[in-house]
Image (tube, rainbow, N blue to C red):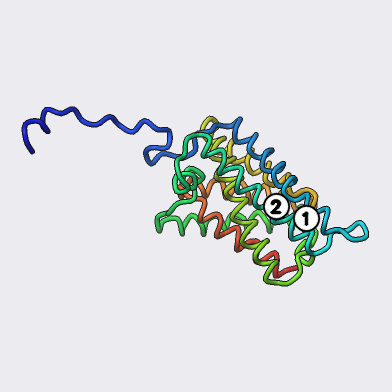
C-alpha cells in the first residue's frame, strides 16, 4: 500500500435502505404495502377479465376460464410487489427479489420450519376440537387435469402469495410496526381474502399467515415459507 492509498479517505458507507443484513429488506412502508395488496387484487381482476369473458358457458366459468382467472390472480400477486420494489429503487431483478425476501437462508431455518409446522398443527387440532372442522370450497376440479391443478395450486399460489403477503405486506408493515402486530395484520388480510372459499377456514388461514410471517422474520427469507405453503396446499389438494 503506497502513501496515496494511506492518505485517501475510506469510501462512504452504503446508505441505501436495502444495505446491510437487517430485517426487513423492504423500504416501502405500511401504506405502500397495504396499497400494494389492493393493487395486486385489482391487477388480478383486470388481467382475468379476458379469460372470464371468453371462458364462460351457461353463466359458469369453463376450465379455460377458471385457469385463466387463477393465473391472472397469481400474476397480480407477483407483478405488483415487484413493481413496488422497483419503484422504491431496487435495481434489477435480483435486487427486486431480495427486497421481497426471495433469497437464500441458513440451515438453522430448518428448525424454524419444523417449529412452524408444529405450531400450525397444534392450532388446527385445537380449532377442530373446540370450534369446528374447517371446510373450504373445492376449486381444484375447475382447473382440469391434475398437472394443471398442481401447477396453479401448489406452485403458483404458494410462490405468489408468499411474495405478496409475506415479502411485500409483512415486510412493509414490519418497518413501522412491532413483530406480532405486523404479523397479525398481514395474517388477517391473508386469511380474510380467502373468505369466499369457506368462512370456517378463515381462522386457520389467519393463523397460518401469522406463522409464516414469523418464519420469514426468523429466517430472513420467504423461501422456507414457500416450501411450507407448497406442502400445505399439496396436502389440501390430496384431501379433496
Q: Which residue is drawn at 82% across and 59% down?
A: 55
Q: Is residue 55 left or right of residue 154?
A: right
Q: What element carries label 1?
A: helix
Q: Is residue 115 shown above or below 170?
A: below
Provide the residue designation for mark 1: 51
Residue 66 falls in image quadrant: bottom right
Q: Residue 67 versus residue 216: which sits nearer the camera?
A: 67
- Between disc 1 and disc 2, the foreground one is 1
Provide the residue designation for mark 2: 72
What x and y, as percent, mark residue 235? 66, 66
What x and y, as percent, mark residue 161? 62, 50
Residue 138 falls in image quadrant: bottom right
In this view of the protein, can residue 24 be seen by the observer? no
In this view of the protein, can residue 20 be seen by the observer? yes
- Assign the C terminus to one quadrant of the image: bottom right
Q: Is residue 122 shown above or below 92?
A: below
Q: Are marks 1 and 2 in contact (CB under 8 Å)?
A: yes
Count of number-bearing discs: 2
What x and y, as percent, mark residue 107? 40, 58
What x and y, as percent, mark residue 17? 43, 33
Q: Neighbour class for label 2 at 10 Å: few (<14), some, many (≥20)? A: many
Q: What element carries label 2?
A: helix
Say which mark, if any, is on residue 22: none
Q: Which residue is drawn at 75% across and 54% down?
A: 69
Amino acid at each position: 500500500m503506497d502513501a496515496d492509498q494511506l492518505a485517501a479517505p475510506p469510501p462512504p458507507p452504503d446508505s441505501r435502505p436495502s444495505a446491510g443484513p437487517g430485517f426487513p429488506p423492504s423500504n416501502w412502508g405500511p401504506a405502500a404495502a397495504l396499497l400494494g395488496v389492493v393493487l395486486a387484487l385489482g391487477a388480478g381482476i383486470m388481467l382475468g377479465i379476458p379469460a372470464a369473458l371468453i371462458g364462460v358457458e351457461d353463466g359458469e366459468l369453463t376450465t379455460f376460464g377458471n385457469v385463466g382467472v387463477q393465473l391472472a390472480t397469481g400474476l397480480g400477486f407477483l407483478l405488483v410487489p415487484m413493481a413496488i420494489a422497483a419503484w422504491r429503487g431496487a435495481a434489477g431483478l435480483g435486487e427486486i427479489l431480495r427486497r421481497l425476501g426471495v433469497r437464500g437462508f441458513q440451515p438453522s431455518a430448518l428448525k424454524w420450519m419444523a417449529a412452524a409446522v408444529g405450531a400450525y398443527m397444534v392450532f388446527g387440532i385445537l380449532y377442530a376440537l373446540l370450534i369446528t372442522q374447517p371446510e373450504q370450497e373445492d376449486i381444484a376440479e375447475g382447473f382440469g387435469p391434475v398437472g394443471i391443478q398442481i401447477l396453479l395450486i401448489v406452485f403458483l399460489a404458494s410462490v405468489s402469495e408468499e411474495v405478496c403477503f409475506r415479502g411485500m405486506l409483512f415486510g412493509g408493515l414490519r418497518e413501522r410496526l412491532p413483530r406480532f402486530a405486523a404479523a397479525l395484520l398481514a395474517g388477517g388480510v391473508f386469511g380474510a381474502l380467502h373468505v369466499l372459499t369457506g368462512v370456517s377456514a378463515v381462522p386457520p388461514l389467519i393463523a397460518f399467515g401469522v406463522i409464516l410471517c414469523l418464519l420469514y422474520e426468523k429466517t430472513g427469507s420467504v423461501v422456507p415459507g414457500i416450501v411450507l405453503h407448497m406442502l400445505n396446499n399439496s396436502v389440501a389438494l390430496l384431501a379433496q
